[in-house]
Image (tube, grey):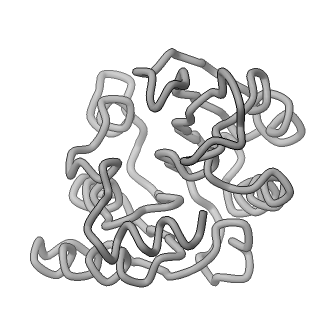
Amino acid sequence: MSFFFRAAYLFGFKPWDSGVSPPELISVVEGPGRLTPGRGLDLGCGTGTNCLYMAQHGWEATGVDFVPRAIAQARRKAAAAGASARFVVGDVTRLTDLGVGVGYELLLDLGCFHSIPDARRDAYIAGATEIAKQGATMLLFAMVRRGDPRRIGPRGVARGEVAQRFASGWEIVSEDAGRPMFGNDAAWYRLRRR
């Protein structure tokens, strides 16, 4: 998948990069039950749309992505908007090695976890758990596999995988259906750090 995403940003093929923050994020930032602004982390931030949104709404926002071209675009967008978001080139399965710090109250993953190879998913969760403050909220969007995980595109998650893998450090607050994508179901998970 690494090659796919690097090539996608190189050639400008990034259908996941709508430039618009999802309603699920807007709800926790601006909605009636909004969270008090604190430290926010966008995992797999791409060109920074959601990280910038958080920064513009009072969050100390950091975005992480392994594609340097995406981070360069995010930094340009932040400079143009006068936003103070920080962007880090790095592997989200090695969060504690990236110097992003700890004490995050809000973590956002808009389709990153479902692209990580199965063997690295527990490392991602361990890092996210370590840098998250107790009681932190994580919003995670993932494609949920219906069929063959060997097809082209993000691998997706198996049914029940998020609950199983995150069980030791997180509790699922809600799981809502998302719009099906590429022949798969999709889901939004809201998790709370134990």
User: Can the viewer see residue 31 in this picture?
Assistant: yes
Which is more toward the observer, 81 or 3?
Answer: 3
Q: Furthest-right residue in view?
A: 168
Q: Position of residue 110 (x, y in %)?
A: 47, 45
How far across and down, in percent of the image, does residue 164 sit? 85, 30
Q: Image check: 88 left or right of 82?
A: right
User: Residue 82 sits in which quadrant?
Assistant: bottom left
Residue in the foreground of this view, choosing between 187 and 106: 187
Taking the image as shown, residue 49 lies to the left or right of residue 120, namely left
Name the one closer to the observer, 185 or 166: 185
* Residue 21 image point, x, y percent: 27, 43
For residue 136, above or below residue 102: above
Numbered circles on residues, count:
0
Q: Residue at x 11, y 71 (%)?
A: 81
Q: Residue at x 77, y 37 (%)?
A: 170
Quadrant occupied by the C terminus: top right
In the displayed structure, 172 sits above or below 13; it is above
Residue 73 position (above or below residue 153): below
Residue 155, quarter of picture: top right
Residue at the image point whose x is 29% and y is 35% from the top: 26
User: Residue 106, can we see it?
Assistant: no
Across and down, in percent, residue 10 comes to: 33, 77
Name the residue at the left extreme: 80
Residue 76 placement: quadrant: bottom left
